[in-house]
Amino acid sequence: MLFSEALATLRAADGGWQALIGEDWLQGRTLFGGLQAALAVRALRQCIPQQWPLRVVQTTFIAPVPPGPVRIEGHVLRTGQSAIHAQARIVERGQTLCSVLAIFGQGRASALRLTPAQPDRGERADEKTELPYGAGTAPPFTQHFVMRWTGGRPPFSGATANTTRIHVRHREAQVLDETHAIALADTVPSPGLSMLTQPAMASSLTWMLEFVDHRFGFPHEAFWRMDTEVTAGGDGYLAQSALLWNPDGVLCALSRQSVAVFG
């Protein structure tokens, strides 16, 4: 099931929405977190016009979301002059499994503009070796993405550095939009896993994604880049930040996650 096909299963149902997602989108016991957030945003878009750019997505992963029918409930919290706050929840039998707060904001005149420059922009992802998908060893959802390391090391390789630089794209041909960028920003593994020498599980608890550029319509075969750093860790929890650069080398989004690691 393509990412776009998974989103296309979303239908209005009983005052909310329902999607039907296959097991190929699993990440451990739960559906891939980037898909959960993308489904929530796509659902909220049913009541928020496209001319309101997505600025912030704040996600809390509360309990595993199983494959199959996925129930989403959501509503607009407030519509202001320049920003709309909206909330969506993935629910099962009255229990909230995932909570998403999204902020959509109109642009306005400002004297401030900061444009970060992408470091090492000249490197070519197509010259690097792809980390192959291994059924039974890698999470099933990763089969839908192409990842190539240009900095740092793969998971469980005993790395000493707390950073990775990974070029990533959707494997299958599809038309990209904001939801595809959300997924890309959650695809790469934590650098903390690269520092381990034995396989271990990890799970995101919270995730905030801030969009600073809204150009998403790149060819599907073009690589985006995630620069990720674990900034602190202890007691089984990691704090990590990341930058998502679009194929033109322009900063698209900033990511911040709290990750539980079991190893």
Image (tube, rainbow, N blue to C red):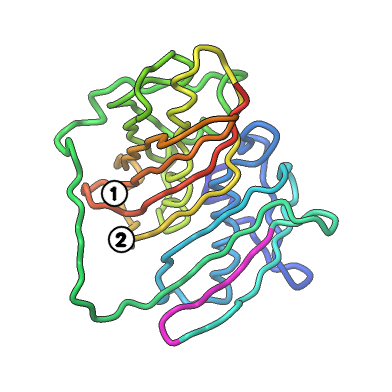
Magenta-span inclusion, residue 139? no
**Residue at position x 45%, y 48% in the image:** 256
Q: Which residue is mark 1?
A: 246
- Residue 216 location, quadrant: bottom left
Q: Position of residue 30 (x, y in %)?
A: 68, 39
**Residue at position x 64%, y 48% in the image:** 61
Rate crowding at label 2 as few (under 14), some (14 to 19) or many (20 or more) other CA atoms within 10 Å: some
Q: Which residue is mark 2?
A: 213
* Left or right of 182, for residue 253: left
Asked if 112 appears above or below 142 in the picture, the reply is: below
Q: Position of residue 245 (x, y in %)?
A: 29, 47
**Regarding mark 1 in the picture, which secondary structure is present there?**
loop
**Closer to us: 145 or 226:** 226
Residue found farthest to the left = 122
* Left or right of 70, for residue 88: left
Task: Locate the N terminus by quadrant.
Answer: top right
